[in-house]
Structures are given as C-alpha cells and as structure tokens.
Image (cartoon, rainbow, N blue to C red):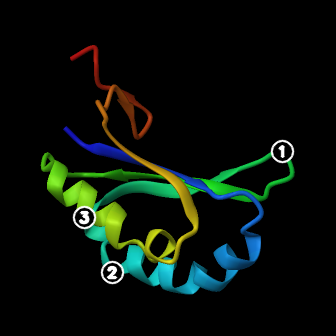
Amino acid sequence: MPYAILTFDKPHEEELRSRLRPEHVAYLDARKHLMLAGGAMLDENDRPHGGIILIDTDDRAIADAFAAGDPFNQGGLFEQVKVIRWRKSFFDFENLISR
C-alpha cells in the first residue's frame, strides 16, 4: 500500500523555500521512480505552503527516509511532516474499488 507524505511549511519562510527549491526538485527527480505523484499545496493566492507526495512503496522505512532526506526538510522549511499509508481507490481516472 503506497504512502502519502504531507508537508507543512513554517510560516513566513517563502525565501527559504525559494532558496532550497532547486535542491528539492533535483532530489525528487532522482527518486521519481518511487513517486506516483507530487506537488505543492497552494493557498488562495497560489503561494506554496507545503506539499503532497505519493510514494509507491509498501515499506514504511522507505517512505520515512524519502521524507527525511528531502532538502526542504533537511533545510528546516517544514513545521510538520506526516507520512501516512494511502489506499488507491481512485487513480489515473479509474475507480479501483469496484474491482
């Protein structure tokens, strides 16, 4: 069962996010073989304030290590990180629960 990694930025850290973003994107790109999806959570003004990453693994340790190694996390951007098991019920425009 995949994992969702939910991250929540510390308030008023837009500059830190911008500075760490190239390292963060390179980190994700090097691990894209593990990712089902990922992207920033946006406020009503389209400013990022956290993110969601779906990891295709059944191993909690892999999901935890992925979250821990993220340059955003290591650089102190995140106020909170949640690693949660996620059931694919609807995915890629398909209903997977009716099977």
Horizontally, residue 97 falls left or right of residue 79, namely: left
Q: Which residue position is annotated with label 1? A: 44
Residue type at the position of mark 3: Ala
Horizontally, residue 94 falls left or right of residue 76, namely: left
Q: Residue furthest left?
A: 59
Number of numbered discs present? 3
Q: Which residue position is annotated with label 3? A: 65
Residue type at the position of mark 1: Glu
Horizontally, residue 17 falls left or right of residue 76, namely: right
Element at label 1: loop
At x 77% / y 47%, what residue is drawn?
A: 43
At x 56% / y 85%, what residue is drawn?
A: 22
Decide which of 18, 79 is in the foreground and name it. Answer: 79
At x 14% / y 46%, what residue is drawn?
A: 58
Position of residue 33 measured from the top left corner of the image (x, y, whole percent):
26, 68
Q: Which quarter of the figure has residue 16?
A: bottom right
**Residue density around tag 2, few if under 14, some if 14–19, many if 20 or more, within 10 Å:** few
Q: Which residue position is annotated with label 2? A: 30
